[in-house]
Image: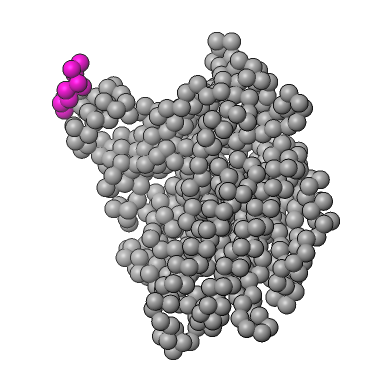
């Protein structure tokens, strides 16, 4: 952008455009929750809304969208469409969909839909794309829901759509719709979600077009360039405040779902002046299990998520913010896998990678780092057939504790750092739609890691099964507990237990695809907590006593971990 042109932008106009593009994505976000058909979308919010410029650079995203969807998947999908069609063949009224692992590098359910935005007088000019990345609930493949630990390559996980037009010049392409509808187990729900996605793309396009036309496309594009430059400058200033150096940390996952060998997670962060480099050279190679991801959907995405949490806090997520962030990532790694690698559970390593990035900077940024959060999807799902023979699947998310920091206790229970504002599907809705009943939903005592500031707490959930079905679980970090920082202690790990006819059996490895359940069985899920910050014995006695009174911490933990004795009348004192 010409600096003279930048100075001519009225600052009020700049702020209207800055907040306008974000408010448009937020409006479409809200609309999707009102129009989608499946609880995955309208309750759990398994989607994100974004906007790019004409080159496919991310310029805005909704505030509540899943970070793993817009961090790079939206931009990479748009850039692939530009490579295939070129700007001249992307017409007003075209709609493109893409879920290709060679492009986004995530599981095939994550399907980006986008449409060009043209504005200006006369022969309208391409100024960008409005995009929505949505989890399509089933796209074929070997397993119900398409994502499964049983897959050994991407072809078992469903159908691939590599940057294909679903609408052309304002008209739907019926053949593509038939292909989509005939390759899902849940056509009514999926096609309804797609209509919500499509409506969001069209309305987002129209609103952005009006914004650009209101101020003129030259002013609009100059404002976008200036916004990106300002975000870049702010982020570089934050990096310059970090001492130069190379910072490292490592952790591990329990296994890859195909075997029982731990998966090493090693992160190196290099700070040099106003740039930061994330080096994944020593992270695990691609694995046999389906927890792989591609370069953009894995390596770039995890680096950007961690960067936003720790370094660019307060700045919007756009390409300007990420310009100072560099990546070293050889091919063939866990987060730069081949496009044919299984990716059904691609996001399972992400929370741990983000935690490890933060841990690496513990000595450099002690006032900003946090203890590890529970760091795993901790999800459970049930699948089977209803009494009328129709299939069902449901997915209940695991919300756990986040790590404490230098100023306050950890939050939660929330979803992981990779999920953003995804929510628990209301219990009443789950019980209405699916054959189980909740018998307990409570905070898990002693799950938060002890510290001067205590880690956040996880949940306890109990499901009473009302009809035969199969259980799916997706937990990790049972062997690598959510660590504390700066002297804090680890939080509790999670677990899943099936209680059948009075006998209790913990699920081996905490991952399963097809564990048969019978009516009357009880499934117990305990979600992990967050790590603590600072030495536990520096926590004031009154705060420990308050935690015991509220049931967050047991009297035994108060004495053992905090050195605080709680008497029978509730009074507390620092013990030996």
Residue appearing at x 38%, y 34% in the figure: 457
Q: Does 140 sit left or right of 3 as displayed? A: right
Q: Tell me if 270 is positioned left or right of 517 in this view.
A: left
Q: Residue at x 57, y 53 (%)?
A: 31
Query: Coloring scheme of the render?
Result: one colour
| x and y percentages locating residue 497 in the rendered image | 54, 22
Range covered by the magenta-colored residues: 566-575
Label count reads: 0
Task: Tell me where residue 30 appears, x and y as whole percent.
Answer: 53, 53
Q: In this orientation, does residue 332 appear?
A: no
The quarter of the rendered structure image containing the C terminus is top left
Q: Main secondary structure of the magenta part?
A: loop
Residue in the image at 52% along x and 35% along y: 426
Residue 332 x/y as whole percent: 64, 54
Q: Quadrant of residue 77?
A: bottom right
Residue 571 among those drawn in magenta: yes
Q: Residue at x 76, y 26 (%)?
A: 388
In this view, the residue in front, 109 or 95, is 95
Q: Is residue 440 visible?
A: yes
- 551 left or right of 397? left
Give 333 or 433, whichever is nearer the viewer.
Answer: 433
Q: Nearer the viewer, residue 313 or 114?
A: 114
């Amino acid at each position: 952008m010409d600096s003279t042109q930048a100075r001519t932008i009225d600052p009020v106009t700049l702020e209207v455009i800055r907040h306008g593009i974000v408010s448009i994505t937020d409006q479409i976000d809200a609309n999707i929750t009102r129009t989608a058909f499946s609880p995955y979308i309208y309750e759990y919010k398994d989607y994100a809304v974004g906007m790019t410029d004409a080159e496919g650079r991310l310029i805005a995203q909704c505030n509540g969208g899943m970070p793993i969807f817009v961090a790079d998947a939206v931009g990479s999908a748009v850039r692939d469409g530009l490579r295939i069609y070129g700007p001249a063949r992307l017409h007003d009224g075209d709609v493109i969909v893409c879920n290709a692992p060679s492009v986004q590098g995530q599981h095939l359910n994550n399907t980006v839909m986008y449409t060009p935005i043209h504005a200006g007088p006369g022969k309208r000019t391409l100024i960008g794309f409005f995009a929505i990345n949505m989890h399509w609930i089933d796209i074929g493949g070997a397993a119900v829901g398409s994502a499964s630990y049983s897959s050994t390559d991407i072809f078992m996980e469903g159908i691939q759509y590599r940057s294909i037009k679903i609408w052309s010049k304002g008209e739907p392409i019926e053949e593509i719709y038939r292909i989509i509808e005939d390759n899902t187990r849940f056509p009514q729900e999926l096609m309804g979600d797609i209509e919500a996605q499509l409506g969001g793309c069209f309305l987002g396009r129209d609103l952005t077009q009006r914004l650009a036309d209101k101020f003129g496309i030259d002013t609009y594009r100059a404002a976008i360039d200036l916004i990106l430059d300002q975000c870049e400058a702010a982020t570089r200033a934050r990096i310059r405040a970090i001492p130069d150096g190379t910072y490292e940390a490592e952790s591990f996952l329990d296994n890859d779902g195909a075997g029982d060998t731990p998966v090493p997670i090693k992160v190196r962060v290099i700070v040099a002046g106003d740039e930061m480099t994330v080096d994944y050279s020593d992270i695990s190679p691609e694995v046999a299990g389906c927890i792989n991801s591609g370069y953009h959907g894995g390596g770039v995405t995890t680096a950007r998520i961690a960067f936003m949490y720790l370094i660019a806090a307060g700045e919007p997520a756009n390409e300007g913010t990420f310009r100072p962030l560099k990546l070293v990532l050889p091919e063939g790694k866990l987060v730069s896998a081949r496009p044919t690698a299984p990716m059904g559970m691609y996001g399972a390593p992400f929370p741990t990678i983000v935690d490890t990035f933060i841990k690496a900077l513990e000595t450099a940024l002690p006032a900003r780092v946090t203890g590890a959060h529970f760091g795993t999807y901790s999800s459970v799902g049930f699948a089977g057939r209803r009494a009328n023979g129709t299939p069902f699947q449901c997915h209940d998310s695991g919300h756990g504790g986040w790590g404490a920091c230098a100023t306050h206790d950890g939050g939660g229970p929330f979803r992981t750092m990779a999920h953003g504002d995804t929510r628990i599907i209301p219990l009443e809705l789950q019980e209405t739609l699916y054959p189980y009943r909740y018998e307990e939903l409570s905070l898990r005592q002693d799950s938060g890691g002890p510290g001067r500031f205590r880690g956040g707490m996880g949940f306890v959930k109990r499901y009473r099964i009302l009809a035969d079905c199969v259980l799916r679980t997706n937990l990790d970090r049972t062997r690598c507990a959510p660590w504390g920082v700066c002297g804090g202690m680890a939080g509790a790990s999670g677990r899943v237990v099936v209680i059948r006819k009075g006998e209790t059996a913990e699920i081996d490895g905490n991952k399963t695809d097809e564990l048969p359940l019978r009516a009357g069985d009880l499934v117990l899920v305990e979600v992990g907590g967050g790590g603590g910050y600072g030495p536990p014995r520096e926590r004031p006695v009154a705060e420990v006593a308050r935690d015991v009174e509220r049931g967050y911490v047991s009297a035994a933990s108060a004495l053992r971990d905090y050195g605080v004795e709680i008497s029978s009348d509730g009074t507390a004192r620092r013990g030996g």
